[in-house]
Image (cartoon, rainbow, N blue to C red):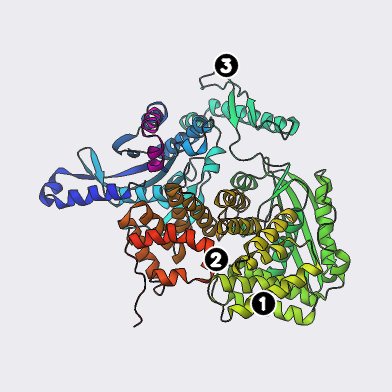
Amino acid sequence: MSHAGLFERGTADQSASSRDSLATATSRRLSAILAADVAGYSRLMGADEERTHERLKAHRRQVVDPKIKEHHGRIVKTTGDGLLVEFPSVVDAVRCAVEVQRAMVNRNAEIVEEQRITFRIGINLGDVIADGGDIYGDGVNIAARLEALAEPGGICISGTVRDHIRDKLPYAFEDMGEQSVKNIARPVRVYAMDAAGVASTPLVAALLETSSGRSRGPKHFLIAASIATAVGLGIVVWWVWPHGHSTTAAVQIPAAVGLQSSTAPITYTAIKAAAPRLSIVVLPFSNLSNDPDQEYFADGITDDLTTDLSRISDSFVIARNTAFTYRGKAVDAKQISRELGVRYILEGSVRRTGDRAQVNVQLIDGETGAHLWADRFETDRGNLAGAQTEITGRLARSLNLELVKDVGRRIEAERAIDPDARDLTMRGWATFYRAGAAGKSGAREEAQRDFERALEIDPHSIDARIGLAMILNYNIADGVSNSIKQDKARAGQLLIEAIEGDPNRSLAHAAMGMLRRLENRLVESQVELEKAVALDPNDAWALRQLGHTLMFQGKAEAAIPHVEKAIRLSPREPNLAVAYMIIGKSHLFLGHVDVAIDFLRKAVAERPGLWVPHLKLAGAFGLRGDIDEARAEIAESLKLKPEMNSVARFRALEAYQEPGFQERHDKTIILGLRRAGFPEEVASQ
């Protein structure tokens, strides 16, 4: 559990005592504060109390406490499964956190997941009130709130911490934006390193950084040379290692001056699934046209290339929603490679003049930053699909891979499409992806107008049909459709026509799968979504939809891996909160209440302005008996959507009408809301 409440109550209790004595007996200082707890601790204790307690003590004795001491930290207090630690240096605090979490990866490697002890850590730099051996204040409370936002095995730091370590430590933290946290007046800028980021940090990295940080002389360069040698060896080992077998390789790190040498090799264990030979992200192509309004044209080329590359055998292609979060950012290719876990990066630019388009493409090795391949293509709008297929084909040949047979757009058919219709379709998809899927006011309407106009010009457009159906689906799912029955019928007809026109279009089957779920035709939904995933195994959206349908069918255990893969493919997805909610509800239906709360907390942290995750988290808290926390989340939900103020209104949502799902929903989230005092019905005013 999170210990923010305990730390805050300590502050309140102290304030309740004599203020005069507080003024004379206390002092203030700037400190780095680390708050940590064990994810799912109540579940672990319930399963095996004695063994869990002994294992936690062993982790503390063998890893946590020695690391705190090594980095000059002081344990302020412990709260069962939690720690509050003060450091004089924020660099030491972050380094300690990363080393502890990285060490826990190896300690948990041979333990089944449900028995692992996994820490969440939050770090803040702030002014604290020191009273004897204890510390209080907002600086402490923010650290505790950051801990609650961290995923199991991960670390969250405040913007202040990030500013201080930016040029001092090599760790990659992702900007999560400003987050509103409980009992803190102003939003807090949050940066996160998830469990995958921790796992990708070499065991020796922090030790080398410590040595290099204290001496910038010849020893520093010898150490750097040793690292470079080891990395080079690792790359060579990867290329010659027989893929598809063991994912563990022992790499002997050469002894470096200033380091204590060891004869034992250091073993790196792959925590994530081994990346396929072609793991790639297509970054948003730059628009070099004089007209900024042509951005959608570059976006359309990026989307098409992402789709085509997804069909290369054994590929792992990052979803476009995550790729587009790098738009306009000057990020090093190697950093992108580390953050997304890919080996290759494809980037390019588009310059459009009238009906002519010039496309520049380059392939980059994410491990080295080297440019492996580059080319330029001149084309016109009528032959754009042919140029795109040539780009993906040459990319495949350059990597010695084989394109899957009979995939990609049918060039002959595409050449016959009116360029203006294609232009409008590309514009519609760009608007939908940027804002429409998230429900931004006016965006869906704008995209719908473009798709409708494209169909008027070219009545055979498959892309326009899929786009219109997607908008209708989202309107129904979000409860903003003015005519649900008619919208379902039209979406169904559009998708039937799209699939008849191109049976191998993954997105058409995925959209049909979503529609069938909204119609409570769950078996048909599963069939369509499985077809979509078979056609494009890298379609993160289709995988998430498949997990959603399986959860609705009562197949929660089968649902989770699909959604987890969707998150791996699109870790910066703007709608990541939905994925976390699906996993959270699945765990709730399986009886894993603590795990469910962890994921629903992540959903809230991802989209704090969305009412749904707050209300679902409230239900989970109520089910566990945490009534105060449940009521706090209900209050947040009501602030965001005042009309969703009763059990009856929540149960009446269109998405929850399937009888089997509603029964499971009633026994978990609705039951928890009732325990927290959420009214059955509110009398009309």
Sequence-wise, the earlier of marks 2 and 3 is 3
Dots 1 and 3: beta carbons under 8 Å? no
Sequence-wise, the earlier of marks 1 and 2 is 1
x, y percent for residue 562:
61, 51
Residue shown at 63% from the left, 78% from the top: 487
Q: Which residue is mark 3?
A: 263
Q: What type of secondary structure mainly makes up the magenta span?
A: helix
Q: What type is the residue that disc 3 sits on?
A: Thr
Specify start and end residues of the magenta stretch as a single range.
41-58
Q: Nearer the viewer, residue 159 or 313?
A: 313
Task: Using the image, tell me which numbered label, if any, was put on residue 336.
Answer: none
Residue shown at 34% from the left, 79% from the top: 683
Q: Is residue 54 magenta?
A: yes
Classify mark 1: helix, strand or loop: helix
Can residue 585 be seen at all in this image of the molecule? Answer: yes
Q: What type is the residue that disc 1 sits on?
A: Ala
Extreme top residue here?
Answer: 263
Q: What type is the residue that disc 2 sits on?
A: Glu
Nearer the camera: disc 2 or disc 3: 2
The residues tagged by marks 1 and 3 sit, at their Cα atoms, a distance apart of 70 Å
Q: Is residue 315 magenta?
A: no
Q: Is residue 247 above or below residue 541?
A: above
Q: Which residue is mark 1?
A: 489
Q: Is residue 75 above or below residue 666?
A: above
Can residue 186 be seen at all in this image of the molecule? Answer: no
> Split into 4 quadrants, where in the image is the C terminus?
bottom left
Residue shown at 86% from the left, 64% from the top: 411
